């Protein structure tokens, strides 16, 4: 299962070291998201990716072990971004 | 030519018909009224504003008694904008306050070429401090004090952000004060000019303090954002100035913007442009002199990198 940025999302951001505000081009809402979530969005802006790839990306990004705990955190972040309408599962 | 150049008789003649055209910052308004209390308070507070020639105005306003028995029995006043009455009438003694509230409503409802934030805006050394705050926070009192201490008044109520370059547009009008803050300011600034106080309004007792002539004279000068300060008066507490992360400040200011949702992505970009240039703080104060000193120190800081 691969994730992608929802069509139309241009990632309008204002960021600090820890978090970002992001404008949702589809809903008009403004979200406050963590920096790890921001980086996942920026990674998906480059190309769709599956959870494993995104976990490996996050491990490199944050100098962490790519283990089950990280997988769990990445899945939770992806669920949050999906809920916000910023990302979606690629159609198979 | 300023409004103060008109004789009292000519001022009242124009107010009766065809209306008195004047400029406040970026807006031109035309006011018509036969109510003497409005004319006298208007003359007291608006003498420094420039007259303009009609018939064009951004807002055509009229204050007049409503039709029917309310002209005579428990008399009321109605506010008209472009011939329509958007509000219910108020007691006649609130007529001038109604003019001020009505003009604010016109700007906040219609000037959507700007991002409009419910905030005071003052400027010093070329940088604007935006003070967003809900009613009762002490924003207007703080604004009224600071403009007596070298800060230029851009607005006591409405921060207008130009979307193209994030600059703040001046709209210097009389500062609205209410309840205890009226006496606070009269003690702090005994030489300032105040309207008569009016009690029993929806906001309690209200009065307006005349805007500084120097601020009105510079109403064509925009300002770059420099600070976003969320003020709160808390009696008896020590002064604190606490940094707020820009992301958190953004969300709080967006909540205070009249047309943030309406303007969509352009509002996001405009507010991001303001916040990116601003140092953001929570400000708690209980002593006016300490507040003035804190803002003076703030004004001497450079901008964000």
Image (cartoon, helix red, strand yellow):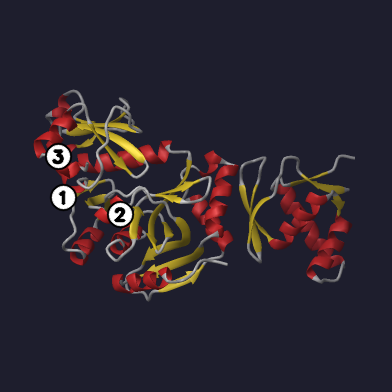
Which label is found at residue B196? Answer: 1
- Give neighbour class at mark 3: few <14, some 14-19, many 20+ (Cα, 10 Å): some
Place of residue B192 in the rendered image (x, y in percent of width and height, measured from the top left): 19, 59
Which label is found at residue B6? Answer: 3
Q: CA distance from mark 2 to mark 3?
A: 21 Å
User: What secondary structure is found at the residue carrying circle 3?
Assistant: loop
Label 3: chain letter: B
A53 vs B29, left or right, is right
User: Height in image: B27 above or below A64?
Assistant: above
Q: Sequence-wise, which precedes: disc 1 or disc 3?
A: 3
| Residue drawn at 67 percent across, 40 percent down | A26
- Give neighbour class at mark 2: few <14, some 14-19, many 20+ (Cα, 10 Å): many
Which label is found at residue B215? Answer: 2
Label 1: chain letter: B
Answer yes or no: are tags 2 and 3 on the same subunit. Answer: yes
Place of residue B288 in the rendered image (x, y in percent of width and height, measured from the top left): 30, 70
Q: Sequence-wise, which precedes: disc 2 or disc 3?
A: 3
Residue A29 quadrant: top right
Q: CA distance from mark 2 to mark 1?
A: 22 Å
User: Height in image: B284 above or below A75?
Assistant: below
| Residue drawn at 53 percent across, 45 percent down | B164
| Residue drawn at 26 percent across, 50 percent down | B174
User: What secondary structure is found at the residue carrying circle 1?
Assistant: loop
User: Height in image: A48 above or below B289?
Assistant: above
Residue reaching furthest to the bottom: B238
B66 vs B296, left or right, is left
Label 2: chain letter: B
């Amino acid at each position: 299962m691969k994730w992608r940025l929802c069509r139309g999302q241009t990632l309008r951001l204002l960021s600090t070291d820890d978090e970002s505000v992001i404008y949702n081009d589809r809903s008009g809402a403004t979200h406050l998201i963590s920096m790890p979530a921001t980086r996942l969005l920026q990674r998906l802006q480059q190309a769709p990716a599956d959870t494993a790839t995104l976990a490996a990306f996050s491990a490199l990004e944050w100098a962490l072990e790519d283990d089950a705990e990280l997988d769990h955190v990445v899945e939770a972040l992806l669920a949050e971004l999906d809920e916000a309408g910023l990302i979606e599962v690629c159609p198979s | 030519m300023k409004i103060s150049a008109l004789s009292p008789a000519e001022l009242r003649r124009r107010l009766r018909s065809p209306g008195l055209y004047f400029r406040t910052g970026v807006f031109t308004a035309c006011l018509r009224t036969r109510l003497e209390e409005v004319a006298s308070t208007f003359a007291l507070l608006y003498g420094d504003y420039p007259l303009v020639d009609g018939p064009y105005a951004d807002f055509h306003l009229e204050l007049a008694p409503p039709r029917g028995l309310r002209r005579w029995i428990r008399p009321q006043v109605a506010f008209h904008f472009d011939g329509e009455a958007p509000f219910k009438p108020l007691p006649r003694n609130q007529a001038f306050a109604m003019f001020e509230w009505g003009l604010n409503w016109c700007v906040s409802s219609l000037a959507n070429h700007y991002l409009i934030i419910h905030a005071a805006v003052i400027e010093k050394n070329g940088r604007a401090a935006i003070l967003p705050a809900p009613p009762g926070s002490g924003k207007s009192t703080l604004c009224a004090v600071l403009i007596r201490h070298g800060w230029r008044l851009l607005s006591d109520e409405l921060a207008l952000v130009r979307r193209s370059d994030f600059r703040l547009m001046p709209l210097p009008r009389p500062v609205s004060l209410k309840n205890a803050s009226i006496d606070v300011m009269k003690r702090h600034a005994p030489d300032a000019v105040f309207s008569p106080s009016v009690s029993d309004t929806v906001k309690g007792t209200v009065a307006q303090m005349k805007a500084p002539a120097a601020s009105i004279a510079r109403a064509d000068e925009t300002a770059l954002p420099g600070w976003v300060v969320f003020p709160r008066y808390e009696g008896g507490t020590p002064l604190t100035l606490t940094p707020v992360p820009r992301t958190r400040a953004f969300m709080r200011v967006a909540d205070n913007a009249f047309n943030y949702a309406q303007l969509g992505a352009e509002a996001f970009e405009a507010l991001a442009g303001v916040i990116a240039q601003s140092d953001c703080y929570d400000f708690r104060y209980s002593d006016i002199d300490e507040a003035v000193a804190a803002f003076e120190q703030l004004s001497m800081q450079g901008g964000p990198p």
